[in-house]
Amino acid sequence: MALTEAVIPTDEIHPIDIVEAVALHHDWDFDRLADDQIAMVVQGQWRSYSLTLAWSARESVLRLICTFDLDPPADRLPPVYETMNLANDQVWDGGFTFWSKQRLMVWRYGLVLAGDAVASAEQVDRMISNALLGCERFYPSFQLVAWGNSSPAAALDIALGEAYGRA
């Protein structure tokens, strides 16, 4: 049975209801902030990630924001920005930005559902999974640049290198 059949009982459902069903399916902690917004925390390998998904009916977009704390020393911000730009060149389904005031690294993505399109649970699940995979993949690179004084290129080699076997 598809994830949609398991958790979505009706054809006419609000996009945030779909997100909530996916969160319940994965047993993630979440808080429905409003009819059009949900927040959750998902534990990754490196850390916990805060996710917020919001539906904009006017724009027909389901927005995902996945954040984690990153508070590098001021002198390391330029190489962090360079690392972020290099990381964004490697991804297709979202991208990083740094919110300096909040000291947060942010993964953003928007799923356009124009023309009465309806998101499936599989799409929402993939959207969230890809955000988490992107953050997990590049988190070590951001850390190495921010606190390990690594160059952006060297730090990204870790994120982009092939892993063989298990440690």
Image (cartoon, rainbow, N blue to C red):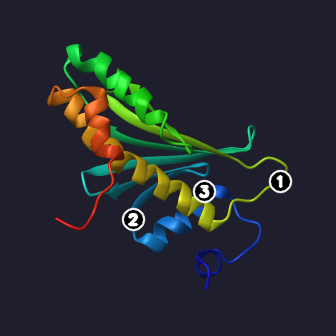
Q: Which residue is drawn at 26% across and 33% down?
A: 154
Residue ID for mark 1:
116
Residue 138 percent coordinates (x, y) = 34, 42
**Residue 11 picture location, percent across and down:** 76, 71
Which mark's residue is nearer the viewer, 1 or 3?
1
Q: In this view, does 7 lie above or below 85?
A: below
Q: Earlier in the sequence, mark 3 or mark 2?
A: 3
Q: Residue 28 carries which label?
A: 2
* Image position of 58 (left or right of 50): right
> How far apart are labels 1 and 3 at the CA level?
15 Å
Q: Where is residue 70 in the image (x, y as percent from the top left)?
A: 27, 32
Q: Are marks 2 and 1 in contact (CB under 8 Å)?
A: no
Cα separation, mark 2 vs mark 1, equals 28 Å
Extreme residue toward the bottom, this view: 1
Residue 59: x %, y % from top left: 74, 38
- The residue lying at 54 percent from left, 41 percent from top is 94
Q: Earlier in the sequence, mark 1 or mark 3?
A: 3
| Sequence-earlier tag: 2 or 1 | 2
Vertical placement of residue 148 versus 119, above or below? above
Element under label 2?
Answer: loop
| Structural crowding at the residue carrying mark 1, measured as other residues with C-alpha within 10 Å and reported as few (<14), some (14–19) or many (≥20) | few
Q: Residues within 10 Å of mark 3 (few under 14, many from 20)?
A: many
Q: Quadrant of residue 165?
A: bottom left
Q: Which mark is residue 16?
A: 3
Question: Of helix, strand and loop, which one carries label 3?
Answer: helix
Identity of the amino acid at label 3?
Ile
Tell me: 151 left or right of 64. Answer: left
- Looking at the image, the residue that sits furthest to the top is 75
Of 64 and 55, which appears nearest the observer? 64
Q: What residue type is labelled 1?
A: Asp
How far apart, in angstroms, are the residues tagged by discs 3 and 2?
Answer: 15 Å
